[in-house]
Image: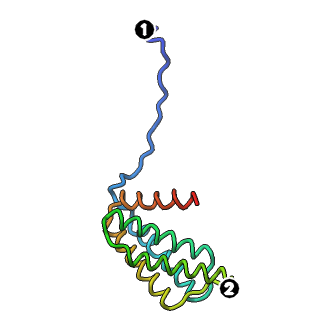
Amino acid sequence: MPNNKRPRKTHKPRLAAMPLTIRHNEEAERELQLTPHMELMKFREGYADEKSWHTIVCRLNIGVIAANEVGDDYSGIRKGLDAMLRIQDRYNKTQKWGISGEDYRDIGDALVQTDNLQLSMTRKQLAKAIKYVYKNAAMN
């Protein structure tokens, strides 16, 4: 009989996860960028819904946080968010999701700026921005 009478600790395997300093694959990167652009096209073609609006706003909020993270100017992204607020106001008045040409251009420019920020950030910085937006959006 062993001298140690305490029971052995059970083995708890650690979950193997990719380090946050390594970027995810190109397909996931491209999907993260293209989805908001496809939702913006739905606005232009006239069959957007509330999900489209939330998808774009979430992406632009991530862009604002990302710009703050890397110390970049986010005035272009802010213009896109203001355009999204105008779209929501228009919906509240007419119960139809519509977009003007100027709003479409501002949102498109803001999404492109967000995409460029994403490519210049590390995976850890991007994950931090996404986590911050999801945490604070869920509270409201």
Q: Point out residue 19 in the picture as x, y percentages from the top left corner.
A: 36, 52
User: Disc count in the image?
Assistant: 2
Q: Quadrant of residue 14?
A: top left
Q: Point out residue 34 in the picture as x, y percentages from the top left corner.
A: 46, 76
Q: Quadrant of residue 111?
A: bottom left
Q: At x 49% / y 86%, what residue is drawn?
A: 104
Q: Given the current orientation, which residue lies at the most extreme bottom position?
A: 101
Name the N-terminal-most of marks 1 and 2.
1
Residue type at the position of mark 2: Thr
Residue type at the position of mark 1: Asn
Q: Which mark is residue 94?
A: 2
Q: At x 44% / y 66%, what residue is drawn?
A: 62
Q: Which mark is residue 25?
A: none
Q: CA distance from mark 1 to mark 2?
A: 80 Å
Badge 2 density bin: few <14, some 14–19, many ≥20, Cα 10 Å: few
- Left or right: 41 with respect to 120? right
Front residue of 74 and 98: 74
- Left or right: 107 with respect to 89? left
Assign a secondary structure to mark 1: loop
Assign a secondary structure to mark 2: helix
Q: At x 61% / y 83%, what residue is drawn?
A: 90
- Left or right: 72 with respect to 4? left
Q: Point out residue 97 in the picture as x, y percentages from the top left corner.
A: 62, 83
Front residue of 66 and 88: 88
Q: At x 69% / y 82%, what residue is drawn?
A: 95
User: Compared with residue 54, is residue 41 higher up or lower down, i.e. above or below?
Assistant: below
- Residue located beneath label 1 in the image: 3
Q: Point out residue 107 in the picture as x, y percentages from the top left corner.
A: 46, 81
Q: Given the current orientation, which residue lies at the most extreme right position?
A: 95
Q: Quadrant of residue 27?
A: bottom left
Badge 1 density bin: few <14, some 14–19, many ≥20, Cα 10 Å: few
Nearer to us of marks 1 and 2 is 2
